Amino acid sequence: MSFDVQHARETGVSARQRPLRYSLLAAMIATSLAHNVASAAETSPPAASDNQTMTVSASAPAEGVEASSPASDYSVPVTRAGTKMLGTVRDVPQSVSIVSKQRMEDQQLQSLNDVLSNTTGIRGISGDMDRTNYYSRGFMIDNYMVDGIPTAFAARWNLGDAQTDMALYQRVEVVRGATGLLTGPGNPSAAINMVRKHADSKEFGGTVSASYGSWNKQRYVADLSAPLSESGNVRGRLIAGWQDNNSFIERYGAKKQFVYGVVDADLTDSATLSVGYEFSQVNTDSTMWGGAPRWYTDGSQIHSRRGYNTAPDWAYNDKENRKLFVNLKQDFDNGWNITLNGAHNEMRLDSKQLYLDGFFDKNTGVGYSSYANYPVVGGTGYNTGKRKVDAVDAFASGPYELFGRQHELMVGVNYSRQDNKYFSTFENISSESLGNFNDFNGQYPESDWTPRLPASDTQLVRQKSTYMATRLSLADPLHLIVGARYTNWNRETPSGEMEKNNTTPYGGLIFDFAENWSAYASYTSVFQPQDYRDVNGAYLAPVIGKNYEAGLKSDWMNSRFTTSLSVFRTELDNVGEATTQTVKGSGDVAYIGRKGVVSRGVEFEVNGALTDYWQMTFGGTRYIAENRDGSTFNPQLPQTSFNLFTSYRLPALQQLTLGGGVNWQTHVWNDVGAPEGNGTWRARQGSYALVDLFARYQVSKNLTLQGNLNNLFDKEYDTNVASSVVYGEPRNVSVTASYTF
């Protein structure tokens, strides 16, 4: 038998109305893989259509090897990304990347950090080993969502959003550009949505895995599902894991533990209720706050070893995350459905650390400050924080008829209350107290801490939103999406209160000009209040602007394989940019608001099943972000980057899967303050490529072994490009054994 899937895309019928007719063999395969397929999409495909067929044939798999299926693809056929209306990626008039469960397993993408580092158009800047901020199209990503509920992200207080463990999540959806319809306020960078795993099996089963890798990394994960009622209408799922690792950074160690439980209940044939709880904890020892100093006072580079650690033994950075959620879905016979999400999240930070950011004499080791009239070469900090988010989101979507054609409508409301409480105390480090830098080995006495005081960015943020969007079928091949989100945004800080009302319009046009091809164009506005302060301590005005995008998309084999090509342009005012000065009365970096910032560029992505044996994702971006005067905005970000990863299961030996990939980016630079604030010096990082390999062997029906090799050529590279250096990981390996029952 051969396995060939043909998907005919109907004209004049939207994705939600383009159901599939399964052959008997297809239905049997889908049934046998229900445990995986149910999690791969939000809903099952709709009822069969007379105008569509799916032809299925398959090569007989080797003994103990499952046949290929959409559940093991890199693509995800059904999503609510972008507009909250159910459809395919092709139905969203924006750039969308979805990282599937299978791809995360192949690449061993164990945290959101790993996922974002391997996603088209996204690059990170690492302040140190535990804090990485991610950017797209030149702007920081500040909206992280779980099941569609966003959490506002503060750059200065990194509470571990990107350290979230992917063992708890089915996929990650990334919508690039402005996403005001989904999130309200936010930078025109991207919105990251993590979709949780659910209890979708009516039989007891699960997977346990163990891995060991470089720097004594140990990781153990158990994922168990079971029915909680005789009929299976109530089901439970438990995921627990533990990880312990050292690092190429000397003396650094980290432990992580997590547990996740969810109960899914079929209240009726058309209503489901999900209740779940998530707990995770990350503890680190001797963790750096910032990287290693970059320059001597004569302008030459300090060539510290990659493993050099400036942290004392008393330094630590601990984070704890607790999430409680409730989800209720109700489907109606007329095609309408209602979704209600409620969430309570608490994230805690407890940290004592030391940083160095001065310039040092090559011969004497004497330090000099980076700042004018601020004679320090570093500092210590005792910081604690708690971020509490309570949110409710409810929306309804479904078809309606107008002027003899069928359309779709989505309406919703959202309320969130985010309480950020940060407390800190610090002590400056002078050149005299540090001593000879050339002899410094990270050992520095712990400060005699003064009482911690509320930080300036302690705040309470409330958002009330209403939103709607409709997909209009103007003609058989032509669809128009229009919508808007109204947001009442309120922030209370120790220094005062600010309230803003904003309406974010959204519009997109999709033209199905061929059987498998579409062209699209979209527009939305940008509104984002900022936490940055100027030299006088005043908050910068909100970022405002416009975002335009146009492109081509295609899908094949029932969306198992997708392609996209987009061009975009973003125009912004009041964009915060770091200066070489500090906020008066503090050591915080001061910012200025830039007007006339423009980002424009092109992106592409190819993703999914090329054949039943061959999966691939290949994406890239080229953009230019400039200030009004023509200078580069955020030059520490690569303006050109590509990422490729592929896996191939050998037809002649189907137990064996081989693959690998490469991440490449162009050179970057950054102008940072010279000694004692006298001008700027330029930090540079040349272009580089990181090559990864993997192999997996299915020993039996239940047991698999997998090996991953990262940074094959042991490339040395800097992930910070500022006054300090933060090296990326050298070559490393891991071996994982997984048993499924």
Image (spheres, helix red, strand yellow):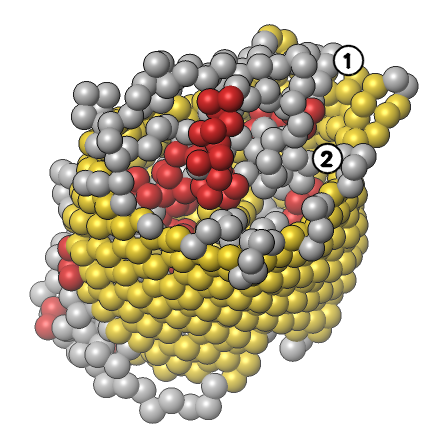
Specify few, some or many for label 2: CA neighbours under 10 Å numbering under 14, 14-19, or 20 or more. many
Residue farthest front in this picture: 230
Let me know if residue 372 appears in the view.
Answer: no
Tell me the residue at 60%/62% (across/down).
275
* Quadrant in which residue 44 is drawn: top right
User: Which of 534 and 665 lies nearest the eye of the viewer?
Assistant: 665
- Residue at (62, 14) in percent of width and height: 52
Which residue is label 2 attached to? 506
Classify residue 115 by image quadrant.
Answer: top left
Residue pointed to by mark 1:
475
Residue 272 visible in the displayed image: yes
Numbered label tally: 2
Give the left or right position of residue 569, taking residue 155 as reference. right
Residue nearest the observer in this picture, 172 or 735: 735
Location of residue 496 (image quadrant): bottom right
Identified at 18% across, 26% down, the residue is 653
Vertical comparison of 388 with 271: above or below:
below
Amino acid beneath label 2: Tyr
Badge 2 or badge 1: first in the primary sequence: 1
Q: Residue at x 22, y 77 (%)?
A: 312
Indicate which disc residue 722 carries: none
Crowdedness of circle 1 by 10 Å Cα count: few (<14), some, many (20+)?
few
Frontmost residue, 637 versus 121:
121
- Secondary structure found at label 1: strand
